[in-house]
Image (tube, coloured by chain):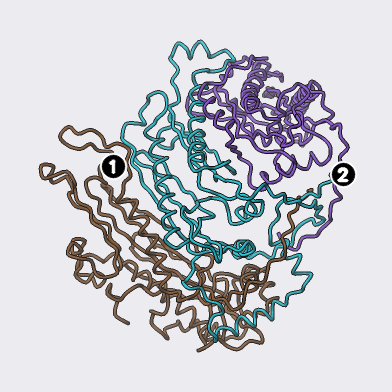
Chain colours: A brown, B purple, C cyan
Amino acid sequence: MTAPPSPDDGPPDGGGTGPDGDLPEAAGRRLGSGSFSSGLTVPDFAACLQMGLRPVGLVQGFCVMQWGWYGAGSPYMRGMTPFSFGGGAPRGVYSESYSCPHGGFMYSNEHRIWGQNYQQPWVESAWAQGFGSAYTRMVEEARAVGAHGVIGVVDSTRLLADMNVTEFHILGTAVVVEGAAAPPGGEPWTTYLAGQRLAKLVEAGYMPISVIAALSSVRVWAYCITEMLMEGTTLSFGGGYMPVSEVEQLSRAHIAARSLAREHVRGQLGNDTLQGAVIVANTQSLAQGDEVIECALRGTRVRRFKDFDPLPPARPTVRLS
Amino acid sequence: MTQPQDLPKEAGHRLEELEHGLFTSDLSVNEFLLIKEAGFHPLGFVMGSSIYHTGIQARRWNKSQELTKLTEAMYNARELAMTRMEEEADQLGADGVVGVRLDVNYYEWGRDAAEFIAVGTAVKAEDGTSHRNAQGKPFTSDLSGQDFWTIMQTGYVPQGLVMGTCVFHIAHRGIGQALGNVGQNVELPNFTQALYEARELAMTRMQDEANQLGATGIVGVRLEEKSHQWGSHTIEFLSLGTAVTKSAGEVTLPKPITVISLDN
Amino acid sequence: MSDARPAKTAATAAAAKTAATAATAIDIRAVMRRAADSLGAPAHDPPARAVTSDLSVDESLLLHSIGWEAVDVVFGASVVSIPPMVWTWGSGEITAASDAHNQAVRSAAKHLGEQCSGVRGHGVVGVRVEVDVMRHHVDVELTGTAVRPVRGKDRGSPFVSDLSARDFTLLHNAGWAPIGLAFGASFVYAPRRTMGTTMRQSSQNVELTNYTEAMYAAREAGMEHMQRSALDMGAQGIVAVQVSEGPMVFAAHAIGFTAWGTAVRLEAESHRYLHPEVVLPLDDATVEFEAQSLR
């Protein structure tokens, strides 16, 4: 087992961080049997044969990660606490602080004079490791059958309730491109697309390289202003209700979470393009205005191999039935 | 027939802005472009609404009959909403309203009161010829942008959205009758008779409206049936369509191309 | 028969493309082989900077046909608070909620525009608008793809539009350009009826005039704000307006109205007509070759 990733390791990597050579024995038997199974629907299957892609097997990868233990002292936190960023966050980690503007006489145990938004790289690394391990295992299965690529990838992450445990499951259909050479290093290319959408992509001049996914996680420790605005409480000592105003701490946290996810993905792209990006953001509201915002960005990394053919002039039509 | 009431003054500000040249439309981009192709320009999104209380009407449990008070109420409420929408269109100087939608909303303020809304996009011919209907008012139609363009190509022009409504109570079967039918495949004459009558009444009334407009025919007729909040033995039948007349000019529909599409 | 106009409306580019594909018989197998063999070689005409895009392939091709390209996925978000106690029963318009909603959309659109300018885009298309009005705050999240003409100069104020790339291309070909997101919202209390009035009205068919006026006022106020926001941008019109209304989940006696659409302006000399063809399809069912979404 490799050491858990440290937050100092730099941006999380979407693939290739898992251990090698640990597929279940049953997988070896299934993949070696000679006939293929495929998760493609019938139309997708027909479309792939039309494109010259011969399916050679259903491949999958699986990984279960636990993270509930990221309090002080856990391998994922390495001595960091929410307050340890006050002295300067580690390089490359997003954080913003907010201070109470009310002045000393407002201080009380209830009044939160200081708050912070910060990125949680330990959560991001754990997610990246889980996704990466599952992905690597799927690619290994594909290699074992001599595939050139994996199409129609489906990935799911599921929280197993009550256990703080997340399972990553990735599966796809391994294919061989008839008449083409094996990819460099024997490393199969992967894509979420299949069937007609894949055909359109290739015809437009893009070759899929790999599935890319990244998660960003931002924790909001609300300060007094945020808490009052979100909870609808008054200022103490006879102050009135706060008027309509932007909750800047939260707005910035939401934008930061999404932008971070985009930057993580960008770090894996090189000079290529991310096609078909899908963003899913999840906000967990804790008490007193605190929040955890997680944003997952997925897509296919593609590389141009020829120019766009000029589109034939579109004929606008009205259908009579 | 109810008297059309004055529009609230709030509507005035919004319509003034539209008269100064800004157009609004809830047409999709496809529809917007087709309206332009037909030689019309959108003026503004127009709406009319009325919150109506439909009174209680006594009904006999074992008799099938039209509940005329409820019919009147449903009709008046929609007429109020449509009339206000037409007034907004009139104020903009429109030739007509396309894409009219009639909705009924129920809110928390209790039973028997509902909000009737009519919305659409007012349009005007770009060449300045008047396309108002035989009564000199902007035409209304529930035609989409695509259907509007198509019908103009056929040489027929819309006159107005016509509707007929009928609220019918269907008699409950007596215990003896119900038990007698248990387990049999048999026509239920009560229901058949009731539904037949109700639908015919609704459609006849719709046709009467079209005749009043001097229309040649009605296109896009649809029949809606709803129980609203009255329980399952009372149903409103609403018949809706767009009345059209043949226009004076000679227009030819272009010959269509037949295709088999390779794509969806 | 002097002005028989051949009819045209918009169809999918894919339909036209497939028709053309059948005519020129593209060898998809050869293209796939060439694509797979290209993996060893360096990229052909790589972008200066990695590109992210949530457009589909069809949309990318449509943009390309008018000389535009995607640059980056961009985001805007804003949370604006609503003072407490505004949702308890009162009368008239709940101005605090309307202000909060409009401020939140404006702020989120501004952030979106800033991100777009930051990557040198001319505007954002296909914006997904998510608005959540809750008891104490309004959350607005906007996601879209920044686009620009392939060899265009930078532009001062980026446009934000919820038009799809397809609709953007159609309007562009007709000579119209989007300017921004026009939006408006208003919230109102449903008026109460007194006990006496209720009993008197219970057997009559009658319009409830104070209710009608309250709802009318609220709806018109929302629409007017939308129009004002468009006029402030220098728009000539608003297309594809979407209107929604309904009671608040957390306060059923409060009704909210929202309206938004894309503000547009005619950029060409005059509107360019499309001249669509009329088509009579003969198939009973189309052959489905579409990859179904597996997620």
Res. B112 visible in picture: no
Question: In percent of the image, x 60 and y 89: which residue is there?
Answer: A181
Closest to the observer, C170 or B56: C170
Are the residues tagged 2 and 1 within 8 Å (C-beta)? no
The tally of labels here is: 2
Q: Amino acid at mark 1?
A: Leu
Q: Which residue is mark 2?
A: C2
Closest to the observer, C146 or A320: C146
Q: Position of residue C208 (x, y in %)?
A: 53, 18
Res. C282 visible in picture: yes
Callout 1: helix, strand or loop?
Answer: helix
Question: In percent of the image, x 67 and y 37: which residue is there?
Answer: B99
Q: Amino acid at mark 2?
A: Ser
**Chain letter for the residue marked with disc 2 in the picture:** C
Residue C148 vertical position relative to residue C239 in the rendered view, above or below? below
Q: Position of residue A220 (x, y in %)?
A: 28, 55
Left or right side of B250 for C279: left
Callout 2: helix, strand or loop?
Answer: loop
Q: Residues within 10 Å of mark 1 (few under 14, many from 20)?
A: many
Q: Which residue is mark 1?
A: A229
Q: CA distance from mark 2 to mark 1?
A: 67 Å
Q: Position of residue A132 (x, y in %)?
A: 41, 75
In this view, the mark in front (2 or 1): 2
Q: Quadrant of the N terminus of chain A?
A: bottom left
Q: Residues within 10 Å of mark 2 (few under 14, many from 20)?
A: few
Residue with the most extreme left position: A105
**Chain letter for the residue marked with disc 1 in the picture:** A
Q: Position of residue A191 (x, y in %)?
A: 54, 73
Tell me the quarter of the picture where residue A231 sits: top left
Residue with the most extreme front position: C269
Residue B9 vertical position relative to residue A14 in the rendered view, above or below? above
Closest to the observer, A62 or C173: C173
